[in-house]
Image (cartoon, helix red, strand yellow):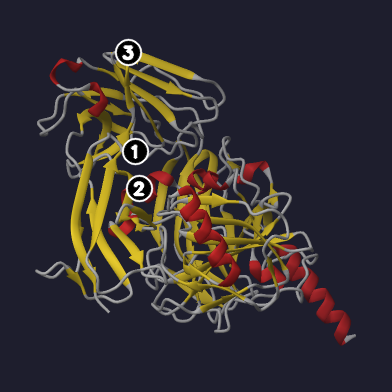
């Protein structure tokens, strides 16, 4: 009888969504962990990021580089990617059970992998590579060291970004489903509730409530908001700001799952077990993008916009939206959870005031639809919006001004608002007269909040400067005629480099960005690692480096508008 009672209680808990339901068909004893330290995470799988769901787990290395990284199972290296941004130095290993493991932001590779990719660097004479070795050319064994932890690419601090992917489907899967656990010691918690009126294309915020001890009470069944919320009648949606805590209660992380109930009936579920790379940008409609851009916190909507095609919702009823057309008191309930089954439940009561929500007046009669292509041409600008670029129907505001900002070569075109997300890049073409400046130096820039300019790129063609952008905002034409800068670090007055392991070169560009970089010693090409986030080039000394002898060092850096900087001098590498 006791066993039957436990089974019954488990069934009820699963039914109402308090316990996360995870797929059970993943091999849990096949892989080992990629590091031999406890897996303390700086970001769990599926974390909410700018423009994407986090596709792996970020494993902390406690600000250290050079920790060993291990192959999690037998396999062969299927891809080696080296980039100044993104994953930095990364290696991909295909395993015979149909999965691929990915190890990113490495300091360097090890063994056969290291010697192979170095030979490719010198064959192609470039740093950035995306190489696909033939099957079984580089085999690895479970537990073999394949590289060393680092901070390469777009990493903001030393750590290992680790993924397990479905090899055929190219979907990333939560490594914890394979029995590779991240340390998580605390319950998740709901911090904020937002209520929306959904009668219009753009959701209208009716309530935005930070949950605290003054407006809520903790009960045996969860946290209860004390006041009954009064809302407008009609179609209604809800959103939450919720966090998980892993090792302490001082740092917040994204939650694993959410279930939303209206009058004790489930209307919406969110689970982040897999990330499809073709769908990951739908995070911009999964959250309240406008609130995030304005106030800096992410509200996860517990309803689905028409343009949201992300496959992270195992249960949806009426897209999570509820129709309230009476003045009765209704109950809403949110069950949020972490991967290990710890949960938090939040309750609130709402009722309608029987009034219709205020509707904003569009700024013009222009309408852009998400499922069709739009072309706007007026006042010296052409805007091309491809099908599928928008998440919802909008009335775009397009305003032309002439700001007093040095370096601007056109009017400023404010295209809608940067608080509205875009799923696909849109094209912008601004008319120009190139009589004053070479057309090859022209590009588009956006004006940031502080009035500074940020390069968008683009090219001149047939009287227009055209570029693609993934954001609404304010755009202008500028020119870049200034060469990048080059500074050799650690150079003594006698042109000696006393660092016995590497040569560091600081380089930067004022606007368009670095396009290419090469260096030569006695007219022989050498490999420079490029750390874009720190504007740093690095030549790591190896067995071919000549020490204690004068030799000519020649460095060439070119930006994206063809402006070239050179540095040439005799130097001595001391040892």
The kind of secondary structure element at disc 2 is helix
Quick one: label 2 or label 3, which is nearer the N terminus?
Answer: 2
Please say if 34 is above or below 479: below
Q: Which of label 2 and label 3 is nearer to you?
A: 3
Residue at the spot 39% in from the left edge and 53% down from the top edge: 208
Percent coordinates x, y for residue 497 in the rendering: 21, 71
The kind of secondary structure element at disc 3 is loop
Quarter-wise, where is residue 83 in the image? bottom left
CB-based contact (under 8 Å), mark 1 and mark 3: no
Please say whether residue 141 is visible from this viewpoint. Answer: yes
Q: Which of label 1 and label 3 is nearer to you?
A: 3
Q: Quadrant of the N terminus?
A: bottom right
Please say if 228 is above or below 438: below
Quick one: label 1 or label 3, which is nearer the N terminus?
Answer: 1
Residue underneath mark 1: 418
Residue underneath mark 2: 293
């Amino acid at each position: 009888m006791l066993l039957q009672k436990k089974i019954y209680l488990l069934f009820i808990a699963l039914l109402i969504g308090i316990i996360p339901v995870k797929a059970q068909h993943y091999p849990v004893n096949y892989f080992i962990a990629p590091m031999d330290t406890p897996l303390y995470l700086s970001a769990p799988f599926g974390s909410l990021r700018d423009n994407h769901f986090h596709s792996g787990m970020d494993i902390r290395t406690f600000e250290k580089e050079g920790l060993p990284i291990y192959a999690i199972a037998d396999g062969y290296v299927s891809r080696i990617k080296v980039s100044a941004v993104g994953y930095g130095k990364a290696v991909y290993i295909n395993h015979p059970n149909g999965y691929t493991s990915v190890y990113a932001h490495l300091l360097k590779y090890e063994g056969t992998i290291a010697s192979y990719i170095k030979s490719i660097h010198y064959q192609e004479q470039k740093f950035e590579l995306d190489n696909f070795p033939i099957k079984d050319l580089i085999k690895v064994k479970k537990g073999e060291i394949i590289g060393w932890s680092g901070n390469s690419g777009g990493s903001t601090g030393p750590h290992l970004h680790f993924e397990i992917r479905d090899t055929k489907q190219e979907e990333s899967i939560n490594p914890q489903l394979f029995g590779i656990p991240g340390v998580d010691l605390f319950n998740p918690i709901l911090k904020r509730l937002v209520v929306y009126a959904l009668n219009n294309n753009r959701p209208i915020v009716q309530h935005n409530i930070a949950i605290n001890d003054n407006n809520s009470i903790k009960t045996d069944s969860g946290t209860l908001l004390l006041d009954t919320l009064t809302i407008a009648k009609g179609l209604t949606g809800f959103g939450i700001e919720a966090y998980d805590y892993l090792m302490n209660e001082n740092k917040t992380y994204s939650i694993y799952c959410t279930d939303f109930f209206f009058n004790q009936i489930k209307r919406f579920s969110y689970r982040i077990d897999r990330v499809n790379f073709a769908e990951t940008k739908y995070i911009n409609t999964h959250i309240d993008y406008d609130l995030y851009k304005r106030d800096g916190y992410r509200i996860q909507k517990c309803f689905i916009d028409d343009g949201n095609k992300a496959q992270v919702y195992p249960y949806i009823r009426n897209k999570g939206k509820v129709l309230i057309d009476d003045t009765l008191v209704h109950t809403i309930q949110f069950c949020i959870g972490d991967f290990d089954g710890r949960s938090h439940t939040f309750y609130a009561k709402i009722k309608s005031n029987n009034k219709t929500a205020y509707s904003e007046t569009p700024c013009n009669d222009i309408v852009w639809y998400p499922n069709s292509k739009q072309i706007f041409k007026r006042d010296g600008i052409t805007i091309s919006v491809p099908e599928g670029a928008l998440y919802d129907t909008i009335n775009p505001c397009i305003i032309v001004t002439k700001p007093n900002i040095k370096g601007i070569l056109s009017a400023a075109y404010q295209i809608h608002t940067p608080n509205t997300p875009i799923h696909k890049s849109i094209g912008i073409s601004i008319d120009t007269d190139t009589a004053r400046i070479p057309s090859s130096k022209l590009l588009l820039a956006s004006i940031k909040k502080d009035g500074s300019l940020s390069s968008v790129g683009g090219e001149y063609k047939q009287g227009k400067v055209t570029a693609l952008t993934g954001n609404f905002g304010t755009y202008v034409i500028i020119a870049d005629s200034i060469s990048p800068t080059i500074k050799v670090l650690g150079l003594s007055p006698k042109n000696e480099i006393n660092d016995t392991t590497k040569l560091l070169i600081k380089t930067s560009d004022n606007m368009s960005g670095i396009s290419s970089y090469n260096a030569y010693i006695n007219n022989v090409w050498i490999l420079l690692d490029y750390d874009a986030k720190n504007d740093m080039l690095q030549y790591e000394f190896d067995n071919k480096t000549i020490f204690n002898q004068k030799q000519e060092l020649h460095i060439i850096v070119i930006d994206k508008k063809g402006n070239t900087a050179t540095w040439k001098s005799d130097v001595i590498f001391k040892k």
